[in-house]
Image (cartoon, rainbow, N blue to C red):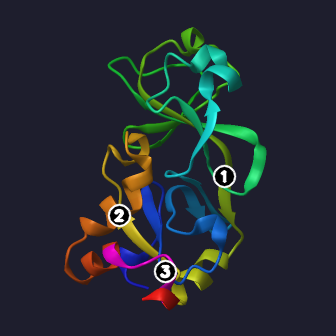
Amino acid sequence: MTEEQIPAAGRLLVATLLIGDPNFSRAVVLVLDHDDDGTVGVVLNRPTELAVSEALPPWADVVSGPGVVFEGGPVGAGGVVGLARAGRDVPAAGWAPMVTGLATVDVSLEPGELGGDVAALRLFSGYAGWGPGQLDGELAVGAWWVFDALPGDPFTARPDELWWDVVGRQGGAYRMYRHAPLDLDVN
């Protein structure tokens, strides 16, 4: 596996057309943690219809648009992962830095209890998870591409277009995949 293919916190896993799992069809996953114990991430491009104002009202004015909860993945669907970028004053409480500029936020707190400001926030119901070696096996068969994330990817106002945006900006041969049908049998 080359350096470019190694998943790491802050990088993107982009589902290829070989994924085979409907939970991840055209998914863009931000890796939150990757080590010998496995990998954890959140799917960035699965907005639900559940408004944050209904699910977690105190966070409704803080969350980035669209103001809905996102389906973070098939694991732990009862829990909520808050992913944020700090504003000028980095929060002191309920803030777990992940990679430069990104952190997970304890959404059981009120936004005012953080002791700092949040520039961007997205809430995810559940997460994507892989056990030890599981993701390596999926990478080996070509089910995922690993790409660097741009700072705006986790908070894009166009989550439904994120897969096409990420793949298209890679250039070269990747650009042709932007036009591939969901079902390759109809091509």
Residue 134, horizontal then vertical, whole percent: 67, 77
Question: Horizontal placement of 4 versus 111: left or right?
Answer: left
Amino acid type at mark 1? Tyr
Q: Foreground mark, 1 or 2?
A: 2
Amino acid type at mark 3? Leu
Q: Residue furthest top?
A: 112
**Front-most of 135 and 97?**
135
Residue 43 image-quadrant placement: bottom right
**Front-most of 38 and 72?**
72
Amino acid type at mark 2? Trp
Q: Is residue 23 above or below residue 114?
A: below
Q: Please give the name of the residue rendered at 43% of the width and 48% of the height, measured from the top-left corner.
A: 159
Report the residue marked by disc 1.
127
Residue 124, horizontal then vertical, whole percent: 61, 41
Residue 48, horizontal then vertical, whole percent: 61, 42
Report the residue marked by disc 3.
17
Report the residue marked by disc 2.
164
Residue 34 image-quadrant placement: bottom right
Region of the chain picked out in magenta, as a range: 179-184
Whichever of labels 1 and 2 marks the residue nearer the N terminus, that label is: 1
Secondary structure type for disc 1: strand
Residue 62, horizontal then vertical, whole percent: 49, 19
Q: Does the magenta run of residues contain 144? A: no
